[in-house]
Image: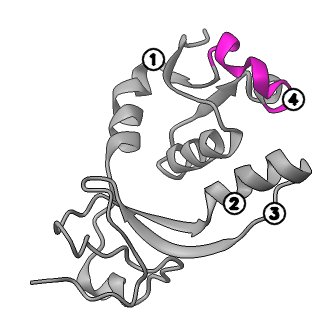
Amino acid sequence: MTEKLVTIATYADPIEANLAKIKLASEDIDCFLADENAVAVYWLAAGAMGGIKLQVKEADASKAAEILSSKKIVTEDEKDNVAIDEPAIPNCPQCGSDDVQYEKFSRKMDFLSILLIRMPVTYPKDSYKCRTCGHSWKQKEEPAE
């Protein structure tokens, strides 16, 4: 007798869906990605199809949902072995908020170049912008205490 499959998560991106599938497979939970190829080929229709559905056996559904929602806690010994690709985003020097966005390229120049020459020309910006107060700064600026 076959067990009924239940959908525990949906994804718009095939890579995210496969990462979740690998995470469950590492915990010995059998799972299946429904509509994976359809969304990969017809990505504009992903919303209409309901995205990529991660399905597991009904008996494993609660354990699988718990595994996907849990976040791995990194111990102090493991922190030394973890490679960090992106620099840590600093707090805003004006208001101290941690809601800061890194801006690598100037969006204004991108849009302007599209309007003028119908082709995006990227202009490096390398700055940070606070989403709370709107303050923009380069990394060299020190926070005010």
- Identify the residue at horizontal 62%, vertical 15% (top origin): 50
Marks 4 and 1 sit apart, C-alpha to C-alpha, by 29 Å
Marks 3 and 2 sit apart, C-alpha to C-alpha, by 7 Å
Residue 72 on the magenta span: no
Task: Specify the segment rendered in magenta.
Answer: 40-50
Q: Earlier in the sequence, mark 1 or mark 3?
A: 1
Residues marked 1 and 3 touching at CB (< 8 Å): no
Q: Is residue 21 above or below residue 141?
A: above
Q: Is residue 37 above or below residue 80?
A: above
Q: Say which mark, if any, is on residue 70.
A: none
Q: Nearer the viewer, mark 1 or mark 3?
A: 3
Q: Is residue 117 above or below residue 97?
A: above
Residues marked 4 and 1 touching at CB (< 8 Å): no
Q: Nearer the viewer, mark 4 or mark 3?
A: 3
- Report the side of 63 relative to 105 (left or right): left
Residue 46 on the magenta span: yes
Amino acid at circle 1: Glu
Q: Say which mark, if any, is on residue 41.
A: 4
Location of the N terminus by quadrant is top right
Residue identified by numbered label 2: 109
Q: Position of residue 71 (x, y in %)?
A: 32, 54
Amino acid at circle 3: Val
Q: Earlier in the sequence, mark 3 or mark 2?
A: 2
Badge 4 element: helix
